[in-house]
Amino acid sequence: MTTTGHELGYQGRSVAVTGVASGIGEATARLLGELGAEVVGLDIAAAAVPLDRFIPFDLRDEESIAHAATAVGPRLDALFHCAGQPQTAPGLDVLLTGFVGLRELTERLRPALQSGGAVTCVASTAAYAWQSQLERIRLLLAQPTFAQAAEWCRNNIGTDGENYALAKGAVSAYTAERSFAWAREGVRINCVSPGPTETPMTEEFRKSEPDYMNRLPMPMGRMAAPEEQAWVFAFLGSPRASFVTGSTVYVDGGYVAALTMGHVTR
């Protein structure tokens, strides 16, 4: 889809996107470029999407994150976190990539975000009940450094699904916490909780549990395309969402709403 981009106000804005090698991150980076932004892409793998600059990095490694934050530069208008690991990956990788590394990069880039800047993180409908787990999530958020958070994670690895939900729930909690601290400074932070989306990560879910997607309730009868998620990321990070902060936005075809009202079960 082509667009002039004037509606969302990205012309001349500098943005950084993680996870640009595939899926939602690739779609978001492509869309932001079409909208007129200067796009810096970050990923552990090479990206095929057109970018103004590409920075290789690994969210599981503090030194790599520090290097990437320096390479992004001193000025940034918006940061988009789209990187992640499937729940089938090793538990520590899921927790480090899904939350610990995300937080570390955000905190390192926070000084580059001036008033009017925005951070948009990827969470998941897998963590729709994160408030009920807030006591445990707070223990992770209370670890002040990358190393301390990583050690906490090593000592608290659970099942595949538990690790994934904990990481994504921590993202929603971190978003809520930081939104209050940054509100008076004019910097916003929100997160998107995608439902099932047709990406390479979905293929990993299918490998571990071939019937997973078939039994997952989908009120709209289909999965999302990455571009459908990308438009929500782009809106939340744009000047047009200037009064939206601290929110977790479900882009799931009605799944969480149906679950809440008892129309479907997990």
Image: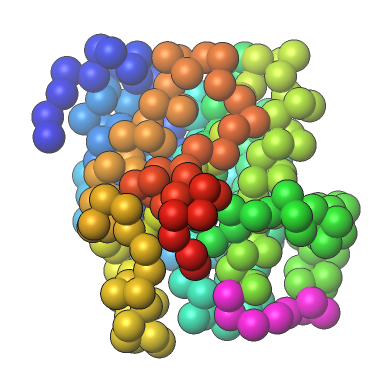
Given residues 56 and 189, the one toward you in this image is 189
Query: Residue 25: percent from the left, percent from the top?
Result: 36, 50
What's the residue at 75%, 55% (across, down)? 132
Q: Residue at image x 51%, y 80%?
A: 89
> In which image quadrant can residue 223 be found?
bottom left
Residue at 65% from the left image edge and 73% from the top image edge: 162
Question: Given the current orientation, which residue lies at the most extreme front position?
Answer: 262
Q: Which quadrant is home to the N terminus?
A: top left
Image coords of residue 242 (percent x, y):
52, 14
Compared to residue 78, the image places residue 254 above or below, namely: below
On the rendered structure, is 87 left or right of 207?
Answer: right
Inspect the magenta stretch and tell me whether residue 90 lies in it: no
Of residues 108 and 80, the one nearer the viewer is: 80
Determine which quarter of the picture holds residue 180. Answer: top right
Q: Splitting the image into 4 quarters, where does residue 227 fall?
A: top left
Segment colored magenta: 154-161
Magenta span main SS = loop
